[in-house]
Amino acid sequence: MTEDTHRSLRLGVAGPVGTGKSSVIATICRHLRDEFALGVITNDIYTDEDARFLRSAGVLPEERIRAVETGACPHTAIRDDVTMNLMAVEDMERDFAPLDIVLVESGGDNLTATFSPALVDAQLFILDVAGGGDVARKGGPGIARADMLVINKIDLGPHVDVDVDLMVSDATAARDGGPVLPLSRKRPETIEALCDWVRRLHAAHAAGKHTPIDPGPMAPHRHAPEDGHSHAHGHVHSRD
Ligand SMILES: Nc1nc2c(ncn2[C@@H]2O[C@H](COP(=O)(O)OP(=O)(O)OP(=O)(O)O)[C@@H](O)[C@H]2O)c(=O)[nH]1
């Protein structure tokens, strides 16, 4: 007989470095932890820094926030060989059953990193206005086809000369009309819009009406590690 595992909604959060992945996860946990049983898995190459940030923010009981130290290109661990992450998600689902939602934070630093549908049911891709208003136009699988594109830190628009409305309409065009969510932790109505999207997604998942979408593979890229050898993967480090 197989073990009775409780299958949560697995929600990936990806995006370039510093756009606010940990902050968005903290926000979702703070606002939805009384409605849903939540868990978080973070990904970093060598540290558990993101997990420590979330634990110190006190957004969930500490044991519900676990780190996967990928020890290699973090994008590989969410896309090409998801074994470490899948085991972490399944362990958490078993240890805290029944969980409603497990959030998985990607290591990030890359405009094209996306999750494999073998790991997550849905994914958020996060850009911020501080990265420049034209980033949304540049496209890529996460921007074009993630379940939701978040444009974060819209409170900073005037300070970095970014027209937020234009960035949102560029992003919507890059997604062929797919959903785009302007967000700022300083604007409660945008946080409520994010929470509503998560609620609807969870309801669709629980009803068996949500179909995971693969945003598509990363573009080819090369790493140049310290030892002078380089190796190629299927993605590009656009902010390296
Ligand atoms: N002004 C403003 N700053 C924000 C907002 N959300 C996040 N930040 C700040 O942006 C910085 C980066 O946020 P993180 O959540 O650490 O970003 P991240 O994508 O998880 O970063 P990495 O894990 O290093 O890739 C932090 O200093 C946050 O305080 C926002 O809505 N407005």
Image (spheres, rainbow, N blue to C red):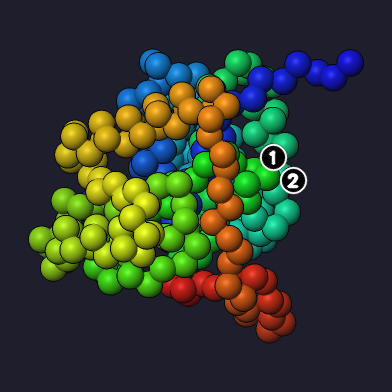
> Which residue is more in the foreground, 157 or 69?
157
Residue 83 is tagged as: 2
In percent of width and height, residue 30 lies at: 35, 27
In percent of width and height, residue 186 lies at: 18, 40
Do labels 1 and 2 touch, CB within 8 Å? yes
Extreme residue in the bottom direction: 228
Q: Residue at x 81, y 18 (%)?
A: 3
Q: Is residue 4 left or right of residue 88?
A: right
In percent of width and height, residue 199 lies at: 39, 27
Looking at numbered disc 2 in the image, what kind of residue is underneath it?
Answer: Thr
Q: Residue at x 54, y 61 (%)?
A: 113
Extreme residue in the left direction: 158
Residue 86 is tagged as: 1
Q: Residue at x 65, y 34 (%)?
A: 89
* Badge count: 2
Looking at numbered disc 1 in the image, what kind of residue is underneath it?
Answer: Leu
> Which residue is more in the foreground, 21 or 196?
196
> Which residue is more in the foreground, 228 or 27?
27
Residue 178 is tagged as: none
For the residue labelled by badge 2, is the local secondary structure a helix, a strand or a loop? helix
Q: Residue at x 38, y 15 (%)?
A: 34
Position of the N terminus, as image quadrant, is: top right
In percent of width and height, residue 22 lies at: 41, 44
Mark 1 nearby-residue class (10 Å; few <14, some 14–19, many ≥20):
some
> Which residue is more in the foreground, 225 or 78?
78
For the residue labelled by badge 1, is the local secondary structure a helix, a strand or a loop? helix
Mark 2 nearby-residue class (10 Å; few <14, some 14–19, many ≥20):
some
